[in-house]
Image (tube, grey):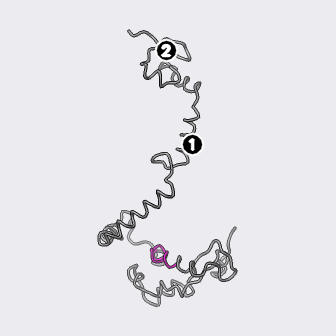
Amino acid sequence: MRTPNAECVVCHKPLYRRPRDKARSRYAACVKHRAEAQVLAGITDAQHAGLALGRTGNHRNGRPDSDATKAKKSATSREYWAARPDEAIARGAKTRGPLNRNWRGGVSKLNKSIRTMTENRKWMDAVKARDGRCLRCGATDALEAHHVEGMASIIERFGIVDRDQARACSALWDIGNGETLCVPCHYAEHGRTLCE
């Protein structure tokens, strides 16, 4: 039997701890009183800081990525896929439509489906960048892009039945058919009331 070199902080029972474990530990406790000893000892400032960082940071490594790291990752990804356009198209084709794991038989309405396309996001950004403010009241925040001729009207006029036809229809992506409105003005344009 080894010679005891520590004692339980709760019941004072003699214990043996390896020298390297004893040097790293703030207390010694028997198995029966381990939880109670941990409560008595509390947590150090370093442990508290680590816990706070883990609560607010990236769940994978305890700290959020810096803006520089995010920009670097984004640039690397863009370069990678720009150099491999065929691979990017093939990769996208494997996960679209019926091949996507979330496919439910095409239940999304065409109008809603078109509004989620990248082309629509680019159109909205271009319209807002061109105007920079609400064309009705002059507001500069909470801006939205509005179709002068409605998207439903364009879909009906050109007989668009799927996303590929929508992608090829230049009338949908014409920034001349868009205007920038703030949220209240956009609601008023469509005859809706904004609940604040």
The tally of labels here is 2
Give the residues in magenta: 113-123
Q: Dividing the image into 4 quarters, which one contains the N terminus?
A: top left
**Hey, which quadrant is residue 53 in on the image?**
top right
Is the residue 40 above or below the residue 137 in the image? above
Disc 2 to disc 1: CB gap under 8 Å: no
The residue where tag 1 is placed is: 52
Is the residue 8 above or below the residue 155 in the image? above
70 displayed left or right of 77 = right
Answer with mark 2 or mark 1, whichever residue precedes in sequence: 2
> The residue under label 1 is which amino acid type?
Ala
Q: Dividing the image into 4 quarters, which one contains the C terminus?
A: bottom right
Element type at marker 1? helix
Residue 40 lies, in percent from the top left, at 59, 24
Is the residue 97 above or below the residue 11 in the image? below
Element type at marker 2? strand
Residue 190 lies, in percent from the top left, at 63, 81
Kindly report the distance in space between the C-alpha atoms of the residues bearing marks 2 and 1. 32 Å
> The residue under label 2 is which amino acid type?
Ala
Residue 139 lies, in percent from the top left, at 68, 76
- The residue located at (51%, 12%) in the rendering is 13
- The residue located at (52%, 20%) in the rendering is 33
**Hey, which quadrant is residue 45 in on the image?**
top right
Q: Residues within 10 Å of mark 2 (few under 14, many from 20)?
A: some
Q: Which mark is residue 6?
A: 2
Between 130 and 139, the one nearer to me in the picture: 130
